[in-house]
Image: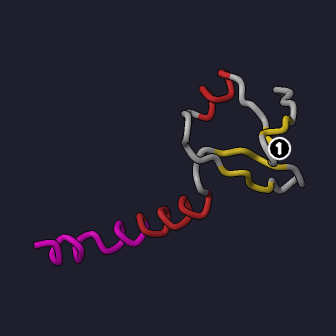
Amino acid sequence: MVELKVRKFGNSLGVVLPKEVISRLNTQDGAPLYLTEAPEGGYRLVPYDPDFEKKMAKAEDIMRRYRDTLHVLAQ
């Protein structure tokens, strides 16, 4: 567990992420992070958009099922 302190940045509040957290999230300056609600009632900070991941999984399923059709259409 990493303790973060909430600080004032202009008119907003924010937290500074330590190097170890940035490394584990595999993120960098300016990259988006997403705060999602966890099933147990807390929050989770993730480096990817969970909605996009669901859409991509669906798209990959469609591409896998219709691989031959898509191959013919690509010609």
Q: Quadrant of residue 46?
A: top right
At x 40% / y 72%, what residue is drawn?
62
Counting from the top left corner in percent of width and height, residue 27 is at: 56, 35
| Residue 5 x/y as whole percent | 87, 31
**Image quarter (top left, top right, bottom left or bottom right) of the C terminus:** bottom left
Which residue occupies the foreground of this view, 3 or 60?
3
Identify the residue at horizontal 60%, vertical 44% (top origin): 47
Q: Residue furthest front?
A: 10
Question: Quadrant location of the N terminus?
Answer: top right
The prevailing secondary structure element of the residues shown in magenta is helix
* Quarter-of-image position of residue 61: bottom left
Vertical side of 30 occupied by 69: above or below: below
Question: Outermost residue toward the top?
Answer: 19
Which residue is at the front of the view, 15 or 52? Answer: 15
The amino acid marked with disc number 1 is Leu
In this picture, residue 31 sits left or right of residue 20: left
57 sits to left or right of 8:
left
Residue drawn 71% across and 24% down? 18
Q: Is residue 22 above or below residue 33?
A: above
What residue lies at 41% left-to-right and 64% top-to-bottom?
A: 60
As for residue 65 lying within the magenta part, the answer is: yes
Q: How is the image coloured?
A: secondary structure
Q: Seen in the image, is 71 located left or right of residue 29? A: left
Q: Is residue 59 above or below residue 5?
A: below
Report the residue marked by disc 1.
13
Residue 11 horizontal/vertical position (percent):
81, 48
Instruction: Give neighbour class at mark 1: few <14, some 14-19, many 20+ (Cα, 10 Å).
Output: few
Q: Residue furthest right?
A: 41
Residue 16, image x, y percentages: 74, 31
Residues drawn in magenta? 61-75
The residue lying toward the viewer, choosing from 30 and 1, is: 30
Q: In the structure shown, which secondary structural element does the residue marked by tag 1 occupy?
A: strand
